[in-house]
Amino acid sequence: MRTLSSLARRPSPVLLLLLLLLPPPWPVCAQLSAAAATRGTPGAQDCPEACACAPGGQANCSRRALPAVPAGLSRRVRALLLDHNRVRALPPGAFVGAGTLLRLDLRENGLRWVHARAFWSLGALQQLDLSGNQLEALAPGTFSPLRALRSLSLAGNRLARLEPAALGALPLLLALSLQDNELSALAPGLLAGLPALRALRLRGNPWVCGCALRPLCSWLRRHPRPAPEAETLLCVLPGRLTLRPLTALTDAAFSRCAQSLAPRDLAVVCALGPVSFLASLAVCLALGSVLTACRMRRCRATALGLRRRALDPGPGSPAAAAQA
């Protein structure tokens, strides 16, 4: 009993030596827990300073009075919420580093200008909200890099015209919101580059019942809309105060409108015009040269005939009678 109690009270030198040689375990545990925490919250390491990031790659920068897109965006950010800030312009490469961004919210920023290369690095973007801003025009190619885009909202801006070159070809776009702008018609070819489009929001625009409205009315007839929403789409007759539903404008209503040429036909006309002009010019020059040559030959023949008559008088001429 004494031997066991003495061993329990006083540890052996071998155990003391092992404890001295081994490193303490708590720093290792702290490092492992920190690494696990970092791996468990993607986006926390590369989160912009002005934003609050959550697991899953969402960067919440809403209502921070930000004057520009925050720096420090990385490929871990999947959703960027920049609504209700003071971002007045988007310069070229405004979202460099966020190549895997899927959702971008820029509502209510007073945005007035978007550079044509502002979205060039966002090839994976699927949702873009630019509603509630002050956009009056969009440069050609603004949305062309967004080939994966499925939802685009331009509602509540000041767009009076939207060119097809601004949207480009968006093969996966399903929803487009253009309501509450200043659009009187849609440019020809705008909806042709959106083959997957199913939802088109158009209310709150001053549509004009004219020939320019023909492409939009044709698209609406091919894509029937719910009755309450279709009844609110009205256009104003030029020079009158009468309103007509867009769905009531059939092909017969545009019978007096000249059929616009397709891009291929327009290219053929533009190519044949200079060629036909040069060909007609060459033909005119050739004909003029032939006529001039014929006239020169006739003049020469007449001159030779007169000379021969002068040198060789005939028997009835005065010179021959004098000789006789």
Image: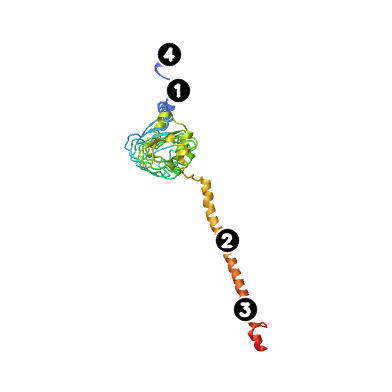
Query: Rounded to the nearest whole Å, what is the CA distance between mark 2 and mark 1?
Result: 115 Å
Question: Looking at the image, can residue 105 be seen?
Answer: no
In which quadrant of the rendered image does the C terminus lie?
bottom right
**Front tag of 4 and 2:** 2
Label 3 and label 2: CA atoms lie apart by 35 Å
What amino acid is found at the position of numbered circle 4 in the picture?
Leu
Element on which disc 1 rests: helix
Q: Residue at x 57, y 65 (%)?
A: 288
Asked if disc 3 and disc 1 are in contact, CB closer than 8 Å, the reply is: no
Q: Which amino acid is tagged 1? A: Val
Say which residue label 4 marks: 4
Q: Earlier in the sequence, mark 4 or mark 2?
A: 4
**Nearer to the camera, 298 or 80:** 298
**Quarter of the rendering containing residue 121:** top left
Decide: marks 3, 2 in contact (CB < 8 A)?
Answer: no
Q: Does residue 165 lie above or below 281 as drawn?
A: above
Q: Amino acid at mark 3?
A: Leu
| Other residues around mark 2 within 10 Å, as few (<14) / some (14–19) / many (≥20) | few
Residue placed most toward the observer, 320 or 106: 320
Percent position of residue 120, x then y: 45, 42
**The one of 187 and 93 positioned closer to us in this rendering:** 187
Q: Closer to the camera: disc 2 or disc 1?
A: 2
Residue, disc 3: 306
Expressed as whole percent of the image width and height from the top left, the position of residue 222 reads: 49, 34
Q: Which residue is mark 2?
A: 283
Sequence-first disc among 4 and 1: 4
* Mark 4 → mark 1, Cα distance in angstroms: 17 Å
Residue at x-position 63% and y-position 85%: 318
The amino acid type of the residue labelled 2 equals Val
